[in-house]
Image: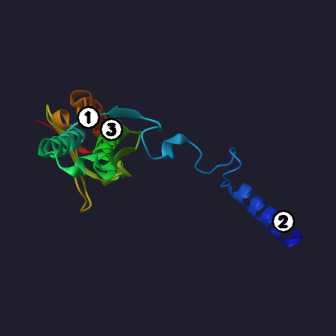
Amino acid sequence: MASFDRKVERNQMKLNKKGKNPLNNKGSGRVGSGSTMGPRGDGDIFKGRKIILPLLLVLLAGLYAGVALAGGGAEVSTTMFWLTIVLYVILAIALFLNKPYLRINKNYLFTAKFNRDRMLEAGQISKITASANKIVITPKASGQNWVFHRRRNLFDTPAMAERLETFAKAHKVNFIKE
């Protein structure tokens, strides 16, 4: 066991010299919150609210319960029936509480797409199109456009457009205002 402890000590010393030891916060590695993904880092954060899919799930659960109760079958009293309805409502609440966001950092844009945090560097952005109800960020690579809707996700698109315009001017990204 002593040889293992020596190996651990040796590796810790190497990491401390490089500044990448996660246990040591005073290195030169990536420590600042600007490099972290998600809505809790540095920069301006614009949050929306998902309402269409949660509302659809609640309506579906209500329709399912209404049809089954109107039919008056024996299946209504089963545990799986009520569990299915409760799980639909729980899924709707979870989706409602998970807010979509756009975080504008000094050199990066962050958002969540398909339950994964995504990041775009300023050099990877082809153009930003802003209108009254929607903002579209087009990447240079063959990826999906980032679309933020005012009506669908309740984003504050005028405030987002102002901040994205300053971001685009600072990094010489094509900004189109419609």
**Tag 3 or tag 1, which sits nearer the N-term?**
3
Residue 49 percent location from the top left of the image: 28, 34
User: Spatial distance from mark 1 to mark 2, Cα to Cα?
Assistant: 54 Å
Q: Residue 5: give its label.
A: 2
Residue assigned mark 1: 165
Residue 8 percent location from the top left of the image: 78, 64
Q: Nearer the viewer, mark 1 or mark 2?
A: 2
Image quadrant occupied by the C terminus:
top left
Q: Amino acid at mark 3?
A: Ile
Residue at image location 89% in from the left, 69% down from the top: 2
Residue 2 appears in the picture as rendered: yes
Is residue 17 shown above or below 122?
below
Q: Amino acid at mark 1?
A: Glu
* Label 2: which secondary element: helix
Residue assigned mark 3: 93
* Label 1: which secondary element: helix
Q: Please name whichever residue, 121 or 3, is drawn nearer the observer in this view of the structure.
A: 3
